[in-house]
Image (tube, rainbow, N blue to C red):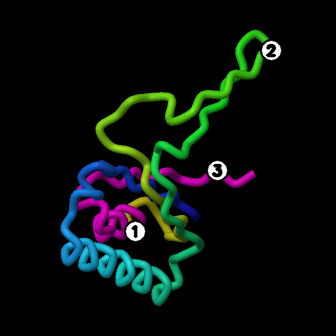
Amino acid sequence: MQYLLLIHTSEAGFAAIPKDQLEQALGAYTAYTEALRKAGALVNSNRLQPVAAATTVRVANGKTQVLNGPYAETKEQLGGYYLIEAPDLDAAISWAARCPGASHGAVEIRPVWAM
């Protein structure tokens, strides 16, 4: 079964990390990605552009509304994702707990509803 691991973190906090610690943090993501790849669990992953680059679209009463930026103000923003293959939710939880984002934000696990 596929699971989407959504990494929520504070953009401001991540941007404030000193360069040497940032390299260490990015290295942790590289190692995590490689562990997923070696286990055959990685389907896809990407880091997202900052929330300021987001566009929100709503349709109300047949009219399209386009808003710059995210719709909701939150302390944590969606910063990236991993789409993984795991036999069950427990395995997905195990992978999410190993994600570096879980130590400085939150990793939401969503089962993919195959269509």
Mark 1 and mark 2 lie on one chain; the one further toward the N terminus is 2
- Is residue 77 covered in magenta? no
Q: Element type at marker 3?
A: loop
In the figure, 54 relative to 103: above or below? above
- What is the spatial separation of the Cα atoms under label 1 and label 2, in whole angstroms? 43 Å
Q: Residues within 10 Å of mark 1 (few under 14, many from 20)?
A: few
Q: Residue at x 51, y 77 (%)?
A: 41
Counting from the top left corner in percent of width and height, residue 50 is at 46, 51
Residue found farthest to the right = 62
The reply, left or right, for residue 28 in relation to residue 44 is left
Q: Residues within 10 Å of mark 2 (few under 14, many from 20)?
A: few
Mark 3 and mark 2 lie on one chain; the one further toward the N terminus is 2
Q: Residue at x 19, y 68 (%)?
A: 18
Amino acid under disc 2 = Gly
Mark 3 and mark 1 lie on one chain; the one further toward the N terminus is 1
The reply, left or right, for residue 45 in relation to residue 9 is right
In the figure, 94 relative to 112: above or below? below
Q: Residue at x 28, y 49 (%)?
A: 12
Which circle marks residue 113 in the picture? 3
Which range of residues does the magenta coloring cover? 92-115
Counting from the top left corner in percent of width and height, residue 7 is at 39, 56
The reply, left or right, for residue 56 in relation to residue 76 is right
Q: Element type at marker 1?
A: helix
- Tell us which disc is closer to us: 1 or 2: 2
- Is residue 99 covered in magenta? yes
Answer yes or no: do the residues labelled 3 and 1 have beta carbons within 8 Å?
no
Which circle marks residue 63 in the picture? none
Viewer-side residue, 8 vs 57: 57
The residue singled out by tag 1 in the image is: 91
The residue singled out by tag 2 in the image is: 62
